[in-house]
Amino acid sequence: MTFTNRELSWLEFNERVLEEARDAENPLMERLKFLAITASNLDEFFMVRVSSIWEQESAGIGPDPSGLLPIEQLGAIGARVHAMTQSQYECLNSSILPALGRENIFFLKYGGLSEKQRAFADEYFEVTLFPVLTPMAIDQSRPFPVLNNRTVNLLAELEDGAGGDGSDSQKSVSYAVVQVPTVLPRILQMPDGSGFILLEEIIVAHIGKLFEGNEVVRVSMLRLTRNSDLVLDEEEMDDLMNEMERSIKRRRWGDPVRMEISRGMCESALSFLEKALDLDKTEIYEVDGPLDLCIWMSFYSRREFARLKYKPMPPVPAAAFVNRASVFDAIRERDVLVRHPYVSFDCVERFVFEAARDPKVLAIKQTLYRVSGQSPIVGALMEASENGKQVTVVVELRARFDEENNINWAKKLEQSGCHVVYGLVGLKTHCKICLVVRREDDGIRRYVHMGTGNYNDATAKIYADTGYFTCKEAFGRDGSTLFNALTGYSKVTNWQKIAAAPLTLRAGFIRLIRNEVKNATEGKPAGISAKMNSLSDPEMVKLLYEASCGGVKMKLLVRGICCLRAGLSGESENIEVSSIVDRFLEHDRIYVFENGGNPRVFLSSADMMPRNLDRRVETLFPIEDAALKKSLIDELELSFSDNVKRRVMQQDGSYKKPGADGRVKIRSQYKAYENAAGDYEEAVKE
């Protein structure tokens, strides 16, 4: 098989994240965080990808590029996730929880509480829990309730206590559901600091009080994952924002695609749930431990566990802007590259804030895909509008699972006087660009920031991304052209520097790859080095295979999905594929083409995926300054030299760490931080 199924490749990536949870060399709380990430990843995978495959099956869609029909994909996914779920709980129960115990961090069962602890739990139930809980009976007049997506629920099996003669002949069995409240902390700490207890432990111990006059025979737990993929007919809708708001509300009630249940659920209760929820046994996942491993993320965040986490790596200020009164002066002197999270995102915020307050600035234009809940950049844009600047913001309302947040910000931007545009019909606006128009002594000058990551101050602390500042005229002109296309009816006829999807980006990649094949054939230096999140586009995969057969050496760093198979004889023996999973999420996209000995270096918002190349507005832009080109090439080489957190794809599609083998250990993210800190220290000395 020369094309790996996308979904199975993604599951292979999630397995690499799970490896970090198993790795005893990682700090204990970081292992717990990685475990929570694998669970959160699986939730989204089922809500979006598995749901989509079920819809393909219903629509009679044919095989994917790997040759698998939808029903075959679902079978393979089910088998893989069942095994992964077992591995997750083995990691929790056999490794992490015992290690927590050795640190005197204990999770208690109600039956094992001391008298003092039990008194606390009982009072908590009576005072706090009982008023919040809502038992929902299931009978002929009260059908099975619609359980919220990703909530933990208790299924109580009841006997009504009838039969005055003491016999069981007149007793009837019924079911009821109680949702574990999401408005209260799921993990409760004992007041004396002696341990923690899960909320459901307390509820189960007192559940009889919710069903007076009935005997609770047994209690099981379940959690549903529902279809949450929004499908919008943009051609038919009158108001995108209103339709998005309605669709977000409908997301909670999508069809179930997965049910997790606690181990030991009786067959009668399981059959009852299968029928009530219309689920097949293959869609049911029995777990040995607390449902919803995502809860460990909030537990990880507790401040008292700092000693069990990574040592802090506070981002350093951008060296290029040190001791500069204005970012515009620095950018006018030379182009600037910044790599987050090693370099603070403050420099991007400063760029927008200075533009908002600078009397010479006439206009600001910016795209927003995912922004934080307390976004400084949005605040700066609103301030700019209030200061009389012409502010245009392209807000992507359809950024998955950030729709509600983006809608709220869009409304606030409009209220402050900004011109807010929601992008183009049928296309998500995924490019990252901010354009500042400034009147200077020698005329109008445009300053541009473009990057590989979102304008999100929160994710900029944990995502490895690269940003680029320039005021070169060609980039400014292309920036204006791009915004005219996004906000008006401008038809782009030519670009000076930028390639943009869905118009020219795919064709640009094709030309660049074929040029390497031509150079290899002519005996000139040829090669491709690239870093991206995902590689799944069939045309790109085929073209890279052709380049390999043509003698082009390739080193690809693909964090997540990679449908290309490396090292196949006669197909891809010239291709090496690696993946890095470490404390920061590798997120930037860097593409380097040897170009006969004069390398061409690009940054992009786009991965090599069909959605990025055909269904999104994306940018690919060149880095032309010699020093900056070298820094990006060096950055890639550093990643490829990582022998601590890098995994290399094997011929069978699995991944294996190369190992240090007696050599000096190189952990690329830590070295990148050292480099950024060194640049800053040198700038301070100047």
Image (cartoon, rainbow, N blue to C red):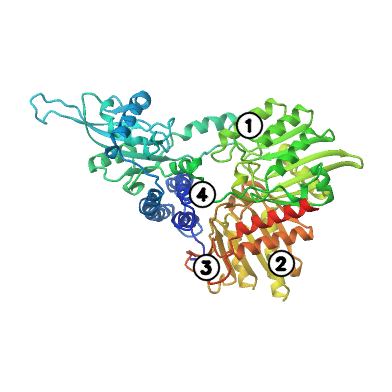
Q: Which mark sits nearer the N-terminus, 1 or 2?
A: 1
Label 4 packing within 10 angstroms: few (<14), some (14-19), many (20+): some
Task: Name the residue that disc number 2 marks.
Answer: 594
Q: Amino acid at mark 4?
A: Lys
Residue at position x 18%, y 30% from top?
172
In the picture, measured across the screen, residue 399 lies left or right of residue 188, that is right
Label 2 packing within 10 angstroms: few (<14), some (14-19), many (20+): many
Please, is residue 61 above or below residue 406 in the view?
A: below
In the picture, measured across the screen, residue 463 lies left or right of residue 676, that is left
Q: Amino acid at mark 3?
A: Gly
Q: Amino acid at mark 1?
A: Trp
Q: How far apart are the two marked residues, 1 and 3, measured between alpha carbons?
A: 46 Å
The answer to whether any part of residue 498 appears in the image is: no
- The local secondary structure at tag 2 comes to loop
Residue reaching furthest bottom? 523
Q: How far apart are the two marked residues, 1 and 4, measured between alpha carbons?
A: 33 Å
Task: Name the residue that disc number 4 marks.
Answer: 309
In the picture, measured across the screen, residue 527 lies left or right of residue 188, that is right
- The local secondary structure at tag 4 comes to loop
Q: How far apart are the two marked residues, 4 and 2, measured between alpha carbons?
A: 41 Å
Q: Which mark sits nearer the N-terminus, 1 or 3?
A: 1
In the picture, measured across the screen, residue 625 lies left or right of residue 543, that is right
Q: Disc 1, disc 3: CB below 8 Å?
A: no
Task: Name the residue that disc number 1 marks.
Answer: 409
Q: Quadrant of residue 87?
A: bottom left
Q: Which mark sits nearer the N-terminus, 1 or 4?
A: 4
> What numbered label is drawn on residue 659?
3
Q: Nearer the viewer, mark 3 or mark 4?
A: 4
Residue reaching furthest left? 165
Q: Nearer the viewer, mark 4 or mark 2?
A: 4
Q: Which mark sits nearer the N-terminus, 2 or 3?
A: 2
Q: Disc 2, disc 3: CB below 8 Å?
A: no
